[in-house]
Amino acid sequence: MALSGTSMQMEALALGWLVLIRTDSPFLVGLIASARMALNFLALFSGTIADRVPRHRLLAAVMFITSLLSLAMFTLLQSGRLEVWHIFTLVLAGNMEAMGRGWEDRDSSIVLTLQEQRAGVQVRLPGL
């Protein structure tokens, strides 16, 4: 959980830095930070979706989509064609994908990979 939080902060820093280097606009840096949180209202629906879809398939689909979005940004960046609107589009698409998976699925993925006899052994300590 701590690693996930750290990676999200690193992503926010890298996106902000990339937008600042490309545009030299503090306003757009703030806007990209806002775009990362723009679709949080979808979290209300992600739990319902997660309950109706097999979690293994949902997690696999989400990881595949995340990989495609990352590959798209990398390809655009390496080709020199990355523009600010690409960054905003990929960030919003990534937000929709993240809300689609639901945080409940990510937290329960460890339990789903264990055998049923060992699933009760895991203890979740919030904040650690």
Image (cartoon, rainbow, N blue to C red):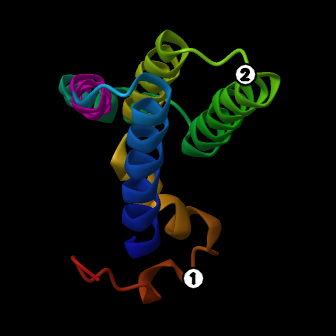
Residue 122 lies in quadrant: bottom left
Can you say which quadrant of the picture contains the C terminus? Answer: bottom left
Left-right relation of 96 to 77? left
* Residue wearing tag 1: 117
Residue 56 lies in quadrant: top right
In the rendered image, residue 122 lying in the magenta stretch gets the answer no
- The front one of 10 and 27 is 27
The answer to which of marks 2 and 1 sits earlier in the sequence is 2
Q: Secondary structure at mark 1?
A: loop
* Residue wearing tag 2: 76
Picture coordinates of residue 92 (x, y %)? 41, 20
Is residue 105 visible in the rendered image? The answer is: no
Tell me which amino acid carries mark 2.
Leu
The range drawn in magenta is: 27-39
Q: Main secondary structure of the magenta part?
A: helix
Residue drawn at x 26%, y 83% is 125
Left-right relation of 24 to 90? left
Q: Is residue 60 above or below residue 88?
A: below
Picture coordinates of residue 57 (x, y %)? 65, 37
* 2 or 1: mark nearer the eye: 2
Picture coordinates of residue 60 (x, y %)? 67, 41
- Badge 1 local density, few (<14 within 10 Å), some, or many (20+)? few
Q: Secondary structure at mark 2?
A: helix
